[in-house]
Amino acid sequence: MSEFEWIANQQRFDELVQTLRSAPAFALDTEFHRERTYVPVLALLQVASAEGVALVDPLAVDVSPLSELLQGRGVCVMHAASQDLEILELACGTAPRHLFDTQIAALFCGYRTSSLAKLVEGFLDVRLDKSAQLTDWTRRPLPDADSRYAAADVSYLLRLRQTLTEALEARGRLSWADEEMARLRTKDRTPPDPETLWWKLRGKTKLNGKARGVAQELAVWRDQEARRRNRPPRSILSDMALLGLAQRPARNPGELRGIRNFDASRFKHTDALLAAIERGLRLPRRAIRTPPKKPADVPSVDGVVALCLAWLAQRANREDLDLTVLGTRDDVTRLVLGEPSRLSSGWRAELVGRELFAIIDGSAALRVNGTELELVDRATS
């Protein structure tokens, strides 16, 4: 499908939203850029229904009325929707009330690829042109080839949903996929506490004492400045320079020289930078937010985790699921420590959670049988 309607008029967009409110399902995708700004720039909105495809220009149209559609009865069909949901919440203030993610659905059908092109080819026998993946979507007018590429991204989603739903029902896994889609839809996308931003720095473990306070205040200042100027935080001050300043806190402009990956001669915010460093040096120890540590009295669980992961890997292979879909090391570790884990509720608990609990509490054991592991009930063995 290559035909589409280009919408750069507010009235026409509002009409489209009202028309789609009665549709049982619609497909949605976004094109955006986040390389040069603090907030991602929505550059194109693609919408498809049984009636056809529309490409909406968010540089000319206020797309916030889309929230009416997203909160309606229709199912919003998307592919690999995680980043798109973030963009929609920024642009419209909401995520879809009903979501079908074709990437998630495909994972439960035994596919281990996240590529829409592979899924469309595998399920619908259609080849998509993916040559425009790195295009500049803010160009106007948008080249026809790029527009057709964008239209194709939503043209087949409704058909793909129908095919995947049938495959999931045949495998008895539709409820599993629904659970994961609901988890994605309701995921907390609240920005992190500014005072914990320095936890993301590589090399933070090398910081001690007042250096941690300086890193905390510099990260807060960098984020505030980046937000104010709508720039990526690292374009304000690199991580390497931030760590260097935390380890060697400058008290005057002259001491800024020699900091790695920091050009003091071109930096235009020296006073604000020095003020942030000074705040960090004066920060009371109780005000420094440090990353949570594993309590010292918690015994090592590496052996139990390794045992559980071995069983989990075998179960994933039997069920034709990617291991990361069934459970991760973090999921298993949390289960072993008695903390909230994806493996302790929902379809995962029914499929493998109870087995893992039995291994952990000792009521079951694993036995090697040739090249396979067997779960043995200790009470009957």
Image (spheres, rainbow, N blue to C red):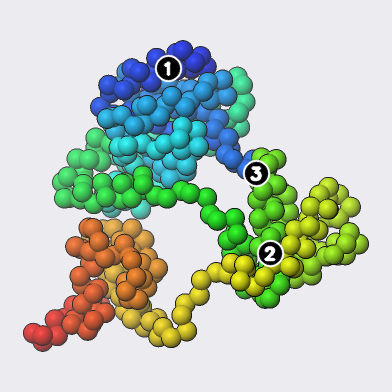
Residue at the spot 71% in from the left edge and 72% down from the top edge: 210
Instruction: Write the residue at 29% across / 33% down.
Output: 75
| Mark-to-mark CA distance, 2 and 1 | 47 Å
Question: Are the residues flagged by discs 3 and 1 in contact, CB closer than 8 Å?
Answer: no
Which residue bears the numbered disc 2?
Answer: 215
Q: In the picture provided, is 284 more to the left or to the right than 269?
A: left
Closest to the observer: 319 or 255? 255
Dot placed on the residue nearer the N-terminal end, 3 or 1: 1
Of the two numbered discs 2 and 1 in the rendering, the one whose residue sits closer to the viewer = 2
Residue 208 quadrant: bottom right
Q: Is residue 316 above or below residue 374?
A: above
Q: Is mark 2 on a helix, strand or loop?
A: helix
Q: Look at mark 1 in the image and give the residue it sits on.
A: 14
Q: Residue at x 23, y 58 (%)?
A: 346
- Residue type at mark 2: give it: Ala
Residue 200 picture location, percent across and down: 59, 61
Q: Name the residue under label 3.
A: 227
Estimate the x, y position of residue 273 in percent, counting from the top left: 78, 55
Measure how far apart labels 3 and 1 are at the Cα level: 30 Å
Residue found farthest to the right: 254
Relative placement, left or right, of 128 versus 199 is: left
Do callouts 3 and 2 mark residues in contact (Cβ within 8 Å)?
no
Position in image of residue 371 (x %, y %): 25, 77
**What residue lies at 55% left-to-right and 56% top-to-bottom?**
193
